Image: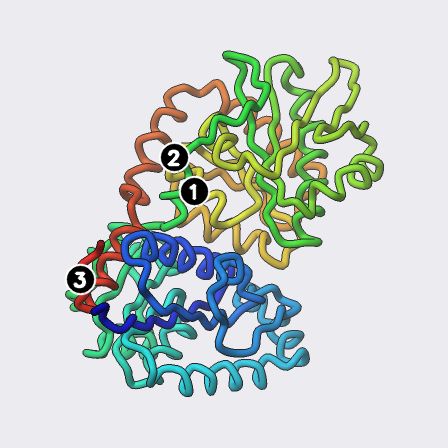
Amino acid sequence: MSSPSKRILFISNGHGEDNHSSYVIETLLQLYPHLDLAAMPIVGEGNAYRRLNIPIIGPTQNMPSGGFSYINRLRLLTDLKAGLVGLTWKQLQAVWQYAPSCDLIMATGDTVSQGFAYSTGYPYVSFISCLSALYEGTLNIGPFIGTFLRSPRCLTVFTRDPYTAKDLRNQGINKAQFGGIPSLDKLEPTGKDLQLQADVPMIALLPGSRLPEAIRNFKLQLNLILEIIKVMSPETIQFRAALVPKVMQELEGIASSEGWQYHPNKLTYKSEKGTVEVLCYSDAFNDILHNCTLMLGMAGLAVDQGIALGKPVIQVPGEGPQFTYEFAEAQTRLIGSCAQTIGTGPATSETLREAAKCVAKTVVDKTYLDECMEKGKARFGPPGASGRIARFLLKSLGINEE
């Protein structure tokens, strides 16, 4: 006779956090399919859960800030006007109503998701995926999140990098352990033909995934390419763009507005020094990261993934709401010397000229590229986060994986 299925509720506050949880869920179901899983995404629509047909227990809504009100407090006001307080209260009530039927809760994210889990009064696992001691050298645990992580109902605290786990243990949170970044487990190349020229450095364009910001970022990157080919010959460099499908659908309009020629999945520009091409893909992210020499990054998690593979990034701030100078500067502190951020505000023509020189210098700096290969992998630790976290959840439920 089969035992009744165990129920886990996943709480997350952010798009990246939803993705982390979804990868853990996929691994969980591979290890033990007989689980009853549900989710409460606090930010956005929870598309990562919907993709897996995981039931969502409360209301969801996209806010004007896109979940980045912490970068600019003025954006918090727009979220408040859009009904943030009422939405959060309804989500909290949904969690309180659902939690008594759960065997375990997993909270992924910062103070908000951890607070939701703590408030239920039931056991939970914390994954502080967006927090790192690498930003400041030590993780400043405020009174709220300190209470949530130190609670005896918090079974363990998973961190995104080994350094943060060690730092938390030094602060007396002995149950802290290295989890990792679950999406790194899905980064295997697929063998996609990127039409690469052998022995020519390849630049990966990562403009982010949220519209309309990703379109603005991609346009900025196209303008940067025009500066790059002023300091490098077009035949000595190649470009591949990893775009979300919605940006791919806008390629013709983007090309028209920026003075490029549009071809299916390809943009070209004729300059005095020759023709430059940008081949665009919505299904080759892994392959582009593995094959690139350098990233032009205007994203968060995508850049982290590249760094973990040992690829350096050059960052040019945009207008936001996500990829601003503040975000890029924080990202630089997280990543360390593998990141170079050009400019201190929304990119100007001078910023792009400086960034172009930086690209030309970096792609031929073999010593620096080798250092990034070593440092990047060490900074984020080995892959396998999904399995580490999933197995801990099963163990906490008293389940032996099948």
Based on the displayed image, in which of its 4 quarters is residue 98 positioned?
bottom left
What colouring method underlies this structural image?
rainbow
Please, which residue is most extreme toward the front here?
A: 1
Look at the image and tell me in which quarter the N terminus lies.
Answer: bottom left
Q: Which residue is mark 2?
A: 309
Q: Residues within 10 Å of mark 3 (few under 14, many from 20)?
A: few
| Residue at position x 79%, y 35% in the image | 255
| Residue at position x 28%, y 79% in the image | 147
Compared with residue 52, is residue 56 higher up or lower down, i.e. above or below?
A: below
Tell which tag, 3 or 1, sits nearer the viewer.
1
Q: Which residue is mark 1?
A: 305
Q: Amino acid at mark 3?
A: Arg
Q: Which residue is mark 3?
A: 169
Q: Amino acid at mark 1?
A: Gln
Question: Which element is circle 3 on?
Answer: helix
Left or right: residue 116 versus residue 397 is right
CB atoms of marks 1 and 2 within 8 Å: yes
Q: Residues within 10 Å of mark 2 (few under 14, many from 20)?
A: many
The earlier-in-sequence mark between 2 and 3 is: 3
| Residue at position x 78%, y 40% in the image | 254
